[in-house]
Amino acid sequence: MSARGLTLLETMVALLILGIVVTSYLEVLGGALRVVDHARTWSRAVAYAEDGMEQVKLAPTGPAAALSAPERLAGGFERRVETRKWADGLVHVTILLTLPGGGRYALEQLVRSP
């Protein structure tokens, strides 16, 4: 640095370094926002699947093997319930959930039949 102040070259290099640092921070922030969005989507998927399982537990027993019609849920989710007899007094329940982005989530559980 000269006694008269910063030269044009020094100023340009400083701005370039600052630009690289700011761009890096923006990339990290964007990645964090994407991770949060995916986590929110999966949390809603798990909640919808658990809700479907609780509905099956509370509902009277249907046929020995059945696949429900697709149920549209808020946020672009779709839920299907599959039940089949497992053993005397037990029903195997599978909740199939389709996520808005095309992903899938399944929750399986053995449930006592009343």
Image: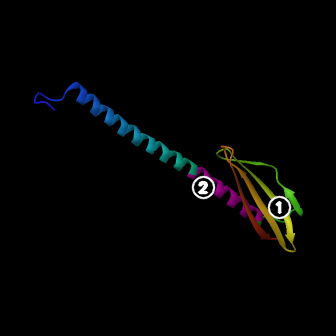
Judging from the image, what secondary structure is the residue with disc 1 in?
strand
Q: Is residue 71 magenta?
A: no
Q: Residue at x 79, y 63 (%)?
A: 93
Mark 1 = which residue? 83
Query: As displayed, is residue 32 above or below residue 108?
Result: above
Q: Residues within 10 Å of mark 2 (few under 14, many from 20)?
A: few
**How far separated are the C-alphas under marks 1 and 2?**
24 Å
Q: Which mark is residue 43?
A: 2
Q: Residue at x 88, y 61 (%)?
A: 65
* In the image, farthest residue toward the left: 3
Q: Quadrant of residue 22?
A: top left
Q: Quadrant of residue 66?
A: bottom right
The reply to whether callout 1 and callout 2 are in contact (CB within 8 Å) is no
Residue 42, x across and y down, in percent = 61, 53
Residue 105, x across and y down, in percent = 69, 54
Query: As displayed, is residue 34 above or below residue 92?
Result: above
Residue 53, x across and y down, in percent = 73, 62
Q: Main secondary structure of the magenta part?
A: helix
Q: Residues within 10 Å of mark 1 (few under 14, many from 20)?
A: many
State the residue in front, 3 or 54.
Answer: 3
Q: Residue at x 87, y 74 (%)?
A: 88
User: Amino acid type of disc 2?
Assistant: Ser
Judging from the image, what secondary structure is the residue with disc 2 in?
helix
Q: Residue at x 35, y 34 (%)?
A: 19
Sequence order check, earlier mark of 1 and 2: 2
User: Amino acid type of disc 1?
Assistant: Thr
Q: Which residues are magenta?
A: 39-56
In the image, taking residue 93 as reference, residue 35 lies left or right, namely: left
In which quadrant will I find the C terminus? bottom right
